Image (cartoon, helix red, strand yellow):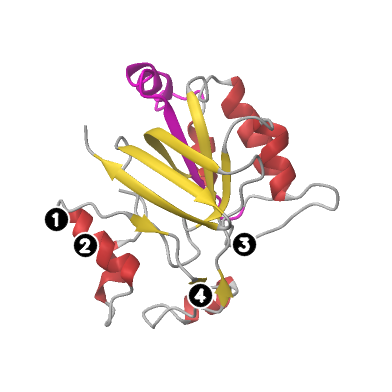
């Protein structure tokens, strides 16, 4: 499961995303809707505020640069800063996974912790060239915690250049290090829906 870490479950009261995490751990998998506000603070402020209530100060708006998205398939993904180091190594079983579930199609989700926009482009390009996206039905990107865009390349443009303008893409979703976050089960059948800046995730184990 990708989302809340165990240390976050000790706070009181529990935010809804943490309540959902506990439900999923117990086997009850709720539909998770996009949140109203998210925590837009610096990394230093995040560390200083660890253990306290989330600082929800910015409106959530999921972006769909290629149009409204309805994406369903096997979920796979995680922190792209870490995943990039596995490409082509003996630990890379991505092709085996996507071949096993090719009839379902693959929904990729990525948490970009701190990659610059040009690094994100090159990483996605390398994954694509390595065959990772062969059966991809769509892509979902969370908010970047430590963001750095080059002068002539935004994150949105980096993603569209790497993946194209036809496949469904969701950006600025509630995934990753910027709280609150959805909880995702790698290998589950997941369905992301997004329009008008909002969205939802439903999952089932098959």
Classed neighbour count for the residue bearing mark 1: other residues with Cα under 10 Å, few (<14), some (14–19), many (≥20): few
Q: Residue furthest left?
A: 26
Front-most of 103 and 45? 103
Tell me where residue 89 appears, x and y as whole percent: 47, 25
- Direction right: furthest residue: 152
Where disc 2 sits, the SS reads helix
**Magenta residues, as a range?**
88-114
Residue indicated by mark 2: 22
Give the residue number, with chain letter if any, for mark 1.
26
178 vs 35, nearest the viewer? 35
Q: Residue at x 34, y 54 (%)?
A: 183
Label 4 neighbour load within 10 Å: few <14, some 14-19, many 20+: some
As measured in the structure, the alpha-carbon distance from the residue carrying label 1 to the one carrying label 2 is 6 Å
Q: CA distance from mark 1 to mark 4?
A: 28 Å
Where is residue 195? Give x, y as percent: 55, 51
Question: Does dot 4 land on a helix, a strand or a loop?
Answer: helix
Say if mark 2 contacts mark 3, CB within 8 Å.
no
Residue 187: where, in percent of width, then height? 31, 35
**The C terminus: image quadrant:** top left
Q: Measure the alpha-carbon separation of dots 3 and 1.
A: 33 Å
**Label 3 vs label 1, nearer the camera:** 1
Badge 1 element: loop
Q: Position of residue 63 (x, y in %)?
A: 61, 52
Residue assigned mark 4? 46
Q: Nearer the viewer, residue 68 or 185?
A: 68
Figure disc tally: 4
Tell which circle, 1 or 4, labels the residue nearer the N-terminal end: 1
Mark 3 Cα-neighbour bin, 10 Å: few <14, some 14–19, many ≥20: some
The answer to whether mark 3 and mark 1 are in CB contact below 8 A is no
Tell me how far mark 4 sits from mark 2, CA to CA: 23 Å
Q: Provide the residue designation for mark 3.
A: 146
Do tag 1 and tag 2 residues touch (Cβ < 8 Å)? yes
């Amino acid at each position: 499961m990708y989302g809340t870490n165990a240390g976050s479950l000790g706070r009181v009261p529990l935010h809804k995303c943490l309540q959902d995490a506990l439900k999923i751990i117990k086997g009850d998998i709720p539909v998770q809707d996009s949140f109203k506000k998210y925590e837009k603070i610096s990394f230093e402020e995040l560390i200083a505020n660890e253990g306290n209530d989330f600082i929800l100060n910015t409106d959530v708006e999921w972006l769909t640069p290629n149009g409204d998205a309805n994406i369903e398939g096997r979920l796979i993904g995680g922190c792209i800063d870490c995943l990039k180091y596995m490409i082509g190594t003996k630990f890379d079983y991505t092709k085996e996974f996507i071949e096993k579930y090719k009839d379902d199609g693959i929904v990729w989700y990525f948490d970009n912790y701190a990659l610059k926009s040009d690094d994100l482009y090159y990483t996605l390009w390398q994954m694509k060239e390595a065959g990772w996206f062969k059966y991809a039905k769509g892509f979902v990107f969370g908010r970047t915690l430590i963001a750095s865009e080059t002068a002539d390349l935004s994150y949105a443009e980096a993603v569209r250049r790497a993946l194209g303008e036809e496949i469904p893409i969701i950006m600025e979703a509630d995934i990753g290090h910027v709280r609150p976050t959805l909880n995702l089960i790698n290998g589950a059948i997941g369905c992301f829906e997004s329009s008008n800046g909002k969205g939802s995730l439903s999952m089932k184990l098959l």
